[in-house]
């Protein structure tokens, strides 16, 4: 911690731990203390105290023996509760998985632990990551760190809140249609969604397999880049993973020179429906980026307004398939008094799943059922191709794209719970890149009526390194 | 305009093996109709000559050696999450009458 009680940068913490200037056991205690003090925000479902303390001791002893304990030595972090982690239940904030203790860990967690990071808790989320506010959690609603009457954004709302509340210096989230970026924007931290396939999905509760991405929520772009550098790359346990950039993702040296960089402002995201306060923050950011030498141009992706409709066909279809495994037989909740296997399935699922999971299973089942498959699912996947083509063209005209993260700031708890369609509209500016597989990052850019507004930056697939370089340069401009 | 009937909702619930309450059937009937109406805008898009996208990274035939790997998990540990176990096997309800 620095003099203001803020966490140091991840690299700084690890370097001080390795130099024996800080002790991992103290950092874990510090983190657990903040978690306890701020538990009324419901950012955390459960702490992994015993295992965290054990791991911290091992790291302190390593350092005492003169060994290097890794690039994240002693750094406490919180994992969204859809990551399988040793030492605690993994519930994905769902009743149907209550009591489930993972017999193995996710690849991302394994890689972070290999570099000395310590998981101290599991963060709240919308159950199975279905949602934009954490209100779909079967357990509790996470409160926005800036205003307790508002949502933190979702579905990685607990992860974002935990970082902003100072519980940990970084947290893990997952992003299927905006679930890292939206809470980063609404809670006020950096959120990074990598290129699809750059981070392994192995050991994370599956939502929609063709867009699920694992990524960090941090206070700075530099920290996000370090976490990505550690977790990115091919994984034998997830055959959709891609090769990492041979140069890695760590940011070092001077900031990217923005002179001559072509940055496209997405026209479709700047139209009507954008809250004036959000527009003001984005416009101010654009002017600062222009003043720093970048060439700002308008870019149009005509099919982008269709992205949300594509998303809410493709994703429920994949959700209904992925949630098929929760049948009450091998793990999770089982209805006890079933007369036959069919009743056991239906009652276990009917009682175990929350409303949003059921809603998505129903939509998915509908769009995949014979007679409707061509009209809905196949058509959506074809419009997706059109979207991919338009993004490809846009990335020929511009090095990067830019826009808001959502049309509005964090809404009030309860405001949209009875209107699922209204809730889905919160994702309207984040689902586009999810469908095309491009990386995107959200950087805090200002406030509107005291609520954070995040600027969203996007790049072509596999351009994660240059996107992070841009984000770091922009972060300094817009925070100034 | 797509509106679902009660029967259609019940049929979907049966296909998805979801026991729904009467209230849920009615709620989902309305909500699914709204959502389906919203996504109907896709019918207006010109998709002539385009193929559907099922994956975005272009990877094909990702192969690995088919070798036995050693894991430290004991079978009993893997059964710990099973709701009902008998003789180290997963116990389920009767399937045929």
Image (cartoon, rainbow, N blue to C red):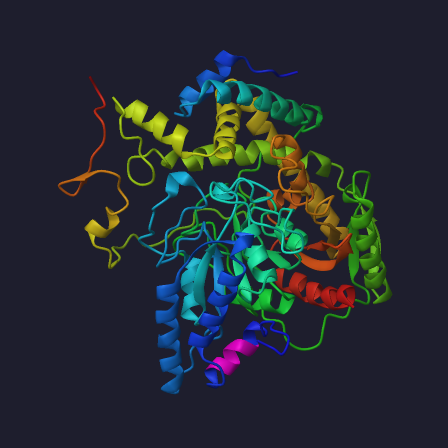
| Residue at the spot 50% in from the left edge and 50% down from the top edge | A124
Q: Indicate the position of residue A293 as horizontal and vertical percent values.
A: 84, 66
Q: Is residue A463 visible?
A: no
Q: Is residue A467 above or below residue A137?
A: below
Q: Indicate the position of residue A110 as horizontal and vertical percent values.
A: 40, 62
Query: What is the quadrant of the N terminus of chain A in the image?
Result: bottom right
B67 left or right of A11 in image: left
Query: Which is the main secondary structure of the residues drawn in magenta?
Result: helix
Q: Is residue A435 above or below residue A454?
A: above
Front residue of A444 and A47: A47
**Residue segment shown in magenta:** A12-17
Q: Indicate the position of residue A255 as horizontal and vertical percent values.
A: 72, 73
Q: Is residue A69 above or below residue A120?
A: below
| Quadrant housing residue A434 | top right
| Residue at the spot 71% in from the left edge and 24% down from the top edge | B44
Is A15 a magenta residue? yes
| Residue at the spot 50% in from the left edge and 59% down from the top edge | A243
Front residue of A29 and A366: A29
Query: What is the quadrant of the C terminus of chain A in the image?
Result: bottom right
Is A254 a magenta residue? no
Q: Is residue A81 visible?
A: yes
Circle count? 0
Front residue of A283 and A209: A283
| Quadrant housing residue A345 | top left
């Amino acid at each position: 911690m620095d003099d203001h009680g803020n966490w140091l940068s991840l690299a700084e913490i690890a370097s001080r731990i390795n130099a024996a200037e800080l002790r991992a056991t103290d950092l874990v205690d510090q983190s657990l203390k903040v978690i306890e003090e701020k538990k009324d925000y419901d950012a955390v479902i459960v702490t992994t105290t015993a295992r965290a303390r054990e791991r911290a001791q091992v790291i302190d002893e390593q350092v005492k023996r003169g060994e290097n304990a890794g690039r994240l030595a002693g750094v406490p972090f919180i994992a969204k509760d859809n990551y399988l982690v040793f030492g605690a239940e993994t519930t994905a904030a769902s009743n149907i998985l209550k009591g489930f203790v993972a017999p193995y860990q996710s690849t991302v967690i394994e890689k972070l632990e290999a570099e000395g990071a310590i998981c101290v808790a599991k963060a709240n989320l919308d159950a199975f990551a279905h949602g934009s506010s954490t209100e779909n959690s079967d357990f509790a609603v996470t409160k926005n760190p800036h205003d307790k009457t508002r949502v933190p954004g979702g579905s990685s709302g607990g992860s974002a809140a935990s970082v902003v509340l100072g519980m940990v210096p970084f947290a893990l989230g997952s992003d299927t249609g905006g679930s890292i970026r939206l809470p980063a924007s609404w809670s006020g931290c950096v959120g990074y969604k990598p290129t699809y396939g750059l981070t392994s999905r192995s050991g994370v509760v599956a939502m929609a397999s063709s867009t699920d991405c694992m990524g960090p929520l941090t206070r700075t772009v530099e920290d996000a880049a370090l976490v990505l550098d550690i977790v990115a790359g091919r994984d034998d346990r997830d055959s959709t993973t891609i090769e990492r950039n041979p140069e890695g993702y760590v940011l070092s040296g001077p900031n990217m020179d923005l002179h001559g960089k072509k940055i496209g402002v997405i026209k479709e995201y700047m139209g009507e429906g954008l809250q004036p306060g959000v527009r003001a923050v984005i416009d101010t950011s654009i002017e600062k980026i222009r003043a720093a030498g970048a060439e700002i141009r308008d870019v149009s992706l005509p099919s982008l307004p269709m992205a949300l409709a594509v998303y809410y066909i493709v994703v429920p279809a994949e959700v209904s398939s992925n949630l098929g495994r929760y049948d009450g037989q091998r793990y999770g909740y089982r209805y006890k008094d079933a007369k036959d296997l069919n009743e056991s399935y239906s009652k276990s699922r009917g009682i175990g799943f929350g409303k949003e999971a059921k809603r998505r299973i129903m939509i998915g089942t509908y769009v995949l059922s014979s007679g409707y498959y061509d009209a809905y699912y196949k058509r959506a996947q074809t419009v997706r191709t059109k979207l991919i083509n338009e993004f490809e063209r846009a990335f020929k005209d511009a090095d990067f794209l830019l826009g808001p993260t959502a049309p509005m700031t964090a809404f009030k708890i309860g405001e949209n719970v009875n209107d699922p369609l209204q809730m889905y509209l919160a994702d309207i500016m984040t689902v586009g890149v999810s469908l095309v597989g491009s990386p995107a990052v959200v950087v805090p850019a200002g406030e509107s009526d005291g609520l954070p507004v995040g600027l969203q930056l996007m790049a072509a697939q596999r351009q994660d390194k240059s996107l992070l370089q841009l984000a770091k340069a922009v972060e300094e401009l817009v925070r100034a | 305009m797509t509106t679902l009937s009660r029967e259609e909702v019940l049929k979907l619930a049966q296909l998805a093996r979801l026991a729904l309450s009467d209230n849920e059937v009615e709620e989902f009937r309305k909500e699914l109709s709204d959502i389906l109406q919203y996504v109907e805008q896709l019918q207006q898009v010109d998709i002539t000559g385009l193929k559907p996208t099922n994956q975005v990274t272009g990877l094909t035939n990702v192969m690995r050696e088919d070798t036995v790997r050693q894991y430290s998990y004991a079978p009993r540990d893997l059964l710990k999450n099973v709701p009902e176990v008998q003789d180290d096997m997963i116990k389920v309800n009767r399937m045929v009458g």
